[in-house]
Image: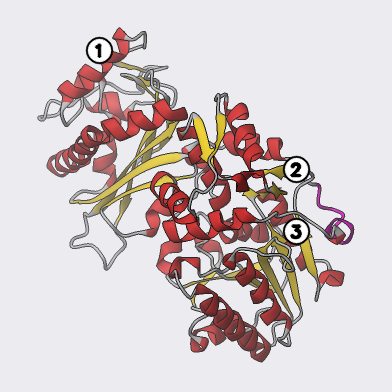
Amino acid sequence: MTSKLILVTGATGYIASRLIPRLLERGYRVRAMARKPDQLEGRAWFSSVEVVSGDVMYSASLAPALNGVHTAYYLIHNMLLGRGYMAFELDGAFNFASAAAAAGVEHIIYLGGLADPSQEIAPHLRSRIATGEVFRQGKVPVTEFRAGVIVGPGSISFEMIRFMTEQFPILPGPNWLHNKSQPIATQNILDYLLAALETPEGRGRIFEIGGPEVKVYADLMLAYARLRGLRRWLLMLPGIPVWFMAWWVGKLTPVPYRIARALVDGLRSDSVVRDDSARRVFSSVKLIDYETAVNSSLAKLHPEMLEPVWTDETRAVNVIKHEGFFVDHRCVEVKALPESVYPVFTSMGGRNGWPYANWLWKLRGWLDKLFGGAGLRGHSPLTPPPFPTLRLRSGRVLGEGTGVRAGDLVDYYRVESLEPNRMMRLHSELRAPGEGWMEWRVDIVPAGEAASAQTSILTQTAFFAPRGLPGYLYWYLLYPLHSLVFHGLIHAIAKQSASE
């Protein structure tokens, strides 16, 4: 393992959360900085990094974060702050540059926005460029990358394209959609960020980075539609106000209104590479074309591929739009050990039925059968359970759950993944305009936090990846009923677990 300590700021953000595991793979020691470090606890790499609290708006918080750091990645923006965010961006950059110099940091790597500063550009792009200028006025050498549309699941620019294209058969937009863009794959962003760490000749320079193709913004949406198998048409509507477009984006996509407004405003100008020196200095980076990047993103429409940002909040119920999914995440405290909870949720369905509103589950299976689906199929294991089934006082058949295997059928689900006494994920085989999963996890409450020694946390997560407008209508129209069932189901599991 290298002795270099790398600081990654904005660790809860999109690029940072994907850069950190890449740094760990290369043997670097990593320190992750976030304003709310507890929001990182659900990340797979959490236990492998040093996590610190830090806020660039408060200089005193930066010294501990920068102590002993060789290179710092600055992956922070303040667009969520709304009006006046440019002043906050510049103040934050100045504070960080000053603290980095005082701590003896050797190198700062900054990811900014791609635009021609000599032209009329959106305020957020002007802010990104000005932030780089602040760093260059400091004492620590900086490598600045300027990128436009980033293509990958979770990227706010890509999620705007994904969610809007999926939901609108006719894509309305202003004449700005004919402006040029040079999209770059997330993979290549990470390649450049890592290459800068190991390429001394890149220090003190600005690099414009993009993929191998220049496209107009409209073509990005139409190409996505074609690769997704959707028929879409473009309708140009001159004069659409920025605030109106941003309002719709904020309502229909995972992108908050304030960020959407800044990004939509950025469409008014071209975003293309004018100086391709990055390709010469970082020649090891092999650029990925737009269609390949989109196909790679679509191939990751699976719960295991998602960054679990729904665990960032401590709320009992968290419903979000994320990386092409609708996610309904719930958690409850259970007065039982995981060994008692796991058999309850693994024995649902089939002869045991569902512990809440079983008649609704039966009705959904009947409707699925009516429209040509498989319907309810009971519980059909691939192999017999390793021991006889046992019927408990509650009437539940224990062996049918404890003998469940990956690949088994459970009514209109198939068991996709199991971790004994911890997790089960089911993949829906219903006829629906999208793909769905249900997942349950149980973990014991850490010592000192539980009211008693036999307390667990049960989480239930529903994932739905809609396909086209029918998929979105399916989710929105049925969600009130689904929400009722999801609420009742997790509480019924908890109740049964405590009584067994």
Residue 173: horizontal and vertical position, in percent? 54, 42
- Residue 216's place in the image compared with 138, above or below, is above
Residue pictured at 83% horizontal, 67% vertical: 199
Which of the two residues, 363 or 324, is positioned nearer the viewer here? 324
Q: Which residue is mark 2?
A: 288
Q: Earlier in the sequence, mark 1 or mark 3?
A: 3
Q: Which residue is mark 3?
A: 192
Kind of residue sitting beneath label 3 = Tyr
Residue 67 horizontal side relative to residue 474, left or right = right
Residue 393: horizontal and vertical position, in percent? 10, 29
Region in magenta? 278-286
Q: Quadrant of residue 350?
A: top left
Q: Quadrant of the C terminus?
A: top left
Which of the two residues, 65 or 116, is positioned nearer the viewer here? 116
Residue 356: horizontal and vertical position, in percent? 16, 31
Label 2 – label 3 distance at C-alpha:
13 Å
Q: Quadrant of residue 444?
A: bottom left
Which of the two residues, 300 or 121, is positioned nearer the viewer here? 121
Verify CB contact (< 8 Å) between mark 1 and mark 3: no
How is colour applied across the structure in the image?
secondary structure
Element under disc 3 = helix
The residue carrying pointer 2 sits among few (fewer than 14), some (14 to 19) or many (20 or more) residues within 10 Å by Cα, namely some
Residue pictured at 25% horizontal, 23% vertical: 349
Residue placed furthest toward the right: 280
Label 1 – label 3 distance at C-alpha:
53 Å
Q: Is residue 183 visible?
A: no
Kind of residue sitting beneath label 2 = Ile
- Residue 432's place in the image compared with 457, above or below, is above
Q: Which residue is mark 1?
A: 366
